[in-house]
């Protein structure tokens, strides 16, 4: 993390974009891009929450429009998230994020608990990042982003490194 940062967002949001283009640019199937993107997602999540001090990190990884893609690709994505998300959650718990901080017992989590903790209960987004060069927010957290600072980068998400995240945070810290 950049040492001289005086301002870190409480709630950062990332629109993860560019996995398919990353694979296409390399002559690879889309699934390779999604896997590379998911691996990067694990790294950036660990870094943002565990090392940079971001309290809330919201991620936009799959839109309803994506269901119109090839069934094999959609199936791969669903399997990728289902099989690997537990690893990220366990790691965040080890870092005292989520329910392990003692305010909520895992056994107490039910449908109503989840409903009460959806977007409506989160603090407003301070900083929205979108990768891949697109400059739109695609209906992601519209209400919560009313006063957010936006950062658009041409970097495709599988190439969005910790250094790229640091550059984004440095940009945020310089804004007023």
Image (tube, rainbow, N blue to C red):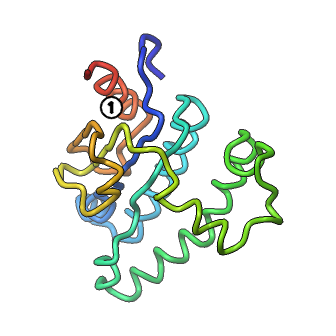
Residue at image mark 1: 168
Determine the residue positioned at 25% across, 38% down. 151
Residue 160: name its quadrant: top left
Q: Residue 66 location in percent, x, y?
A: 32, 77
Q: Residue 16 location in percent, x, y?
A: 36, 55
Left-right relation of 24 to 71: left
Q: Is residue 73 above or below residue 125?
A: below
Left-right relation of 104 to 55: right
Element type where label 1 sits in the image: helix
Q: Is residue 137 above or below residue 161?
A: below
Determine the residue positioned at 35% across, 33% down. 164
Residue 175: name its quadrant: top left
Q: Residue furthest top?
A: 4
Q: Is residue 67 above or below residue 98?
A: below
Q: Nearer the viewer, residue 62 or 160?
A: 62
Q: Residue 39 location in percent, x, y?
A: 51, 53
Q: Nearer the viewer, residue 12 or 39?
A: 12
Q: Nearer the viewer, residue 2 or 22?
A: 2
Determine the residue positioned at 42% across, 41% down. 12
**Mark 1 burial class by Cα count in 10 Å: few <14, some 14-19, many 20+:** some
The image shows a total of numbered marks equal to 1
Determine the residue positioned at 27% across, 46% down. 146
Q: Residue 72 location in percent, x, y?
A: 41, 86
Q: Is residue 160 above or below residue 6?
A: below
**Quadrant of the image for the C terminus?**
top left
Left-right relation of 64 to 108: left
């Amino acid at each position: 993390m950049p040492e001289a940062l005086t301002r870190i967002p409480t709630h950062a949001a990332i629109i993860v974009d560019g996995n398919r283009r990353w694979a296409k640019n390399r002559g690879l199937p889309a699934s390779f891009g999604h896997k590379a993107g998911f691996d990067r997602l694990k790294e950036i999540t660990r870094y943002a929450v565990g090392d940079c001090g971001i309290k809330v990190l919201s991620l936009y990884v799959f839109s309803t429009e994506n269901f119109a893609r090839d069934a094999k690709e959609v199936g791969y994505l669903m399997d990728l998230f289902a099989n690997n998300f537990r690893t990220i959650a366990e790691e965040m718990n080890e870092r005292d994020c989520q329910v392990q901080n003692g305010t909520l017992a895992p056994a107490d989590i039910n449908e109503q608990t989840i409903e009460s903790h959806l977007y409506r209960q989160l603090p407003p987004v301070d900083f929205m990042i979108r990768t891949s060069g697109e400059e739109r927010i695609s209906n992601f957290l519209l209400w919560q982003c009313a006063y957010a600072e936006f950062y658009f980068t041409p970097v495709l998400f599988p190439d969005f490194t910790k250094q790229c995240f640091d550059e984004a945070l440095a940009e945020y810290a310089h804004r007023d």
